[in-house]
Image (cartoon, coloured by chain):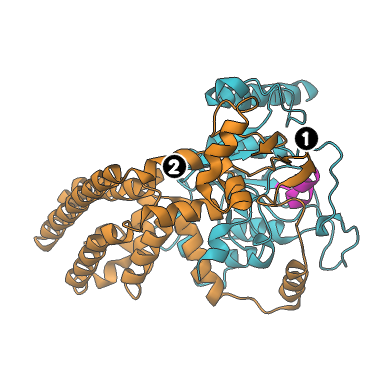
Chain colours: A cyan, B orange
Amino acid sequence: MFVRRFGFAATLMVALAATMGGVHGAFAAGEDVKVKIAPDIPWVDITIGGKTVRIQRIQDTRHKLTNSFTKTSRACPPFCIQPIRPAKGVHLAGELELLDFLKKKVETGKGVLVDARIPAWYRKGTIPGAVNIPFTLFDKKNPYRDRILMVLGAKRLEDGTWDFGGARELLLFCNGPWCGQSPRAIRNLISAGYPPEKLHYYRGGMQNWQLLGLTVVKPATATARK
Amino acid sequence: MWNTVNPASGRHRQNRKPMRLALAGALLCALPFVSSLSAKESTARAFSEGRGASSGVAQLQAELASSVAQQDEADLKALTDQVLKSLETIAGGDTQGKKQQEAPGNYDQLMRALGALVEKATQQGKSSEDILALIEEALAGQDDATLEALIAQAGGKVELRRLLQTLVRKAAMKATADDPYTRMLQAEGEATNTGDAAAGSSATSVAGDRGERVIVVQPGDTLGTIALRHYGSVGAWRKIFEANRHVLSDPNLVPAGVRLRLP
C-alpha cells in the first residue's frame, strides 16, 4: 500500500513537473520560488478558455490567514464535520491530485472542477478553473438537472434512462471538512445514476486550499454579468 | 433538423423545423456582431477581472493591432457561412425523409463548423458566454435540451465551463431551495470574507531602499494590473518593466513575491 501510494505521488510529481516545461526559461526551474507547491512544482499554470492562471502559494513566509476561514466553531448542524468519503466508490483528492486533475482532465475537456457551494460562497473566491454548480441543482426536483447532466456528457436514451458512458469526470469541493455541500452534490449525482468512479472529492476544500496559501480567484463572470 | 440531434424530442418532428432553422440562422448571423465588441473593451475587462492571466500584456498588444482584428472578422464571417451551409444541407436531407442515412455526415459537418466558429470567437478573446447566452435566448421556448445536446456533442471545442455557467445561472433562479439548511448556508456565506486570500488583493506597499515606492507582487497580479492600480493606466506596464529589468526577463512572467520598483 505504501509503495503504491509513493509510486502514485512520484508519478504525479513527474507529470506536473513535466507540465512546467513550457514555462519561460528564466524561471523554468523555479529556483527563485521560496514557497513551492512540492519540491519539483514551483507553481502550476492552467489554461482554460484561452486564459492562463498561475496557481502558486503566497510567498510571504510569515503570512497568516485573518479572514473568515480562521473560524473554528461554526454551529453544527448544519456545519458538521464530514466523513473522508461521501459515498462508496468516489475517488479522494488532495491538493496535488486536484492540480493533476486540472492539467489532465479540465484543460483537455475531459473533466470539470465543480465548486458545489451556493453562489453566496462562490462569489467570495474559488479555486482557479472551477465551475460553480451549487449542490441544490443536482437535486431531482430541479427542472434543469437533466440539462446539466447532458452538458456534463450524459446521454438520455429512448427509454428515458441515462447513459453515463461518455459523462465527464467531476472533481467536487466546497468549504472544507466542515462543509456538507459537495458531499450532498455527490450523493445527488450518484442517485441520478452518475457513476461514483467518475467522481472525485476534495474534502480539504477552500479551507485547506487557503490555509496552504494557494491561489484563489474571485469569479468575474458571477458579478460582472447582470 | 434538430431532431436528429436529440432523439428524445421526436414528438415535435414535423412542426418546428422551419422556425428553428430560421432562428438558428438569425442567431448565427448575429454572432459576428457579438464578437465585434471593441478590442479595448474586452482588454479592459481582462484586466479588471484581476485574474492572473499572465498572457494579459501580450493579449493587449495583439488586440491593439486592428488589422489583425479585421482579418479575424473575415474569418468569423467565413465560418458563419460554413455553419449556415451545413444547416441547410441537414434541413434538406431531413425534409426528404432520408434523415437517418444522411444526417450523421452533415451533422458532423455542422458540429465541426459550429465548433470552429465558437473556437474562433473564443480565440479573439470574445466572451463565449455572451455568444452562448444569445443562443440560449434564441432557442428559449424550443425543445428542451436541444442546445445542450448540440453543444455537448460538439466536444471540447465549445467552452463547456461557459455553457455550464449559463445553465447554472438559469437553473439557480428556478431552483432556489428555501429550507433552513440553505438559509443558514446563505447567511454564513454572505457573512464570509476572504480578504487575505483572494487574488486581486492589492499589492503590499513596502518602503524602498532609497525612498522610492516598492511593491511586492501578489498572486494574480500582472504588470498590467499593477500599472492600472498605481498609474491608472494599463499602458504604464512598460515603464514598470523597464525599471525592473534586473528582476524580470519577460513582461508576461511576473512571479508573486518579487519586489518591483515603481518609477
Q: Mark 1 points at which residue?
A: B210
Residue A5 locus on image (x, y percent): 74, 26
Residue A84 locus on image (x, y percent): 79, 47
Query: B109 left or right of B235?
Result: left
Q: Tell me which residue sits at (36%, 60%) in the image.
A: B131
Query: B67 left or right of A133?
Result: left
User: Is the residue B52 above or below the residue A21 in the image?
Assistant: below
| Quadrant position of the N terminus of chain B in the picture | bottom left
**Which contiguous range is marked in magenta?**
A202-211
Residue A216 shows in this picture: yes
Q: Name the residue under label 2.
A: B59
Residue A201 vs residue B135, the one in the foreground? B135
Q: SS of the residue at dot 2?
A: helix
Residue B39 locus on image (x, y percent): 38, 52
Chain holding disc 1: B
Q: Do tags 2 and 1 sit on the same chain?
A: yes
- Three-letter code for the amino acid on which mark 1 is drawn: Arg
Q: Earlier in the sequence, mark 2 or mark 1?
A: 2
Magenta region includes residue B237:
no
**Pointer 1: residues within 10 angstroms few (<14), some, or many (20+)?**
few
Query: A132 left or right of A79?
Result: left
**Pointer 2: residues within 10 angstroms few (<14), some, or many (20+)?**
some
Residue B41 locus on image (x, y percent): 42, 57
Task: Tell me how far mark 2 sits from mark 1, CA to CA.
Answer: 34 Å
Mark linked to residue A120? none
